[in-house]
Image: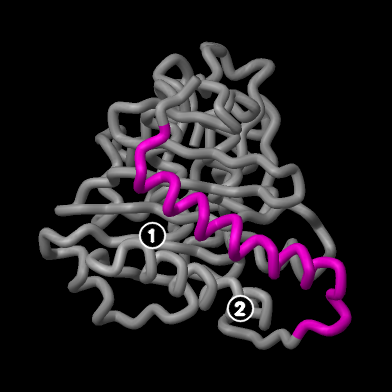
Amino acid sequence: MAIVPPVIVVMEKACRNAAKSLIRDFGELEKLQISKKDKNDFVSSADIRASETISYTLGKDRPDFLQIDEETFSAEDLDKLKGDTPVFISDPLDGTKNFIHGNGYFAVTIGLMQKGEIIAGVTYNPILNELFWAHKGSGSWINNQRLRVSQRDKLDGCMFTSGVQIKHEDILEKGIAQIGSLQRKTSVRILGSSALDLANVASGKFDGFWSLRLNLWDIVAGIILVNEAGGICLNEKGNVFDPLNDESLIASSAAISSELLKSL
């Protein structure tokens, strides 16, 4: 049985509160107001409501912490990460495109950073009621069961996921080429929620995940989930991934990381 750190309790509460409105909206998709943010990138009224819920819950329970949220983000928010004050970084609905199409592969995800380091992360899949959490030095967990990354050490038989997105036109061809290269050797999926992909790497359901460019709120919780489950998160050069400076993330077990890197 896990000893749950107090800050994880706060983050779980925020995720579950936000998920209540998401589940309600998921059952009434025809009533959603949807607008376009970027090429193939959308925001719905469900995102906004969940964002407001997270902000209120975290602000009430940890008023001394700062917050960065996808739906209210501005460039000035990055200055919050330069100080000593802990910062919650949240995506109220990771997998919006899935959500608005009635596909249940989406999540609420919140990470916690301090002095450039990821301290904790929570990712919640409300459709399956899967609550993934990790805290530095406390391991990775799902619904009070310990998580471990896969230990497969050969590409044959592995299953990987990727976060290639068409809105990033400058790196799209590179991403497609990487998928083609790896898919000649093993299975690759693009499922639409990087937060859940990383959580499922931590749980061993996927052997690895990579993406050329993602926002901090997409991956911050997933990175600590993978690390605390015994995995590693690298950049494309094979160095430890820096969430504030690196663009390319490769997350997997140590057993398969070198084979994965060589195949991209």
Point out the tag, 1 or 2, that comes first from the N-terminus.
Answer: 2
Residue to which mark 2 is pinned: 49
Q: Amino acid at mark 1?
A: Leu
- With 92 as the anchor, is 87 left or right in this view? left
Query: Is 14 a magenta residue?
Result: yes
Q: Position of residue 92 (x, y in %)?
A: 55, 66
Marking on residue 113: none
- With 139 as the anchor, is 24 left or right in this view? right
Residue name at image x 26 percent, y 64 percent: 65
* Nearest to the observer: residue 249 or residue 107: 107
* Circle 2 residues within 10 Å: few <14, some 14–19, many ≥20: some
**Residue 35 in the image: above or below residue 179:** below
Q: Position of residue 184 (x, y in %)?
A: 67, 30
**What secondary structure characterizes most of the magenta part?**
helix
Residue name at image x 38 percent, y 69 percent: 60
The quarter of the picture where residue 86 lies is bottom left
Q: Position of residue 240 (x, y in %)?
A: 26, 36
**Residue 156 in the image: above or below residue 104:** above
**Residue 215 in the image: above or below residue 147:** below
Q: Amino acid at mark 2?
A: Arg
- With 248 as the anchor, is 156 left or right in this view? right
Residue to which mark 1 is pinned: 216
- Element at label 1: helix
Find the magenta span and give its range. Answer: 4-32
Query: Is 228 a magenta residue?
Result: no
* Nearest to the observer: residue 25 or residue 232: 25
- Element at label 2: helix
* Nearest to the observer: residue 188 or residue 18: 18
For the image, the number of numbered tags is 2
Residue name at image x 51 percent, y 29 percent: 141
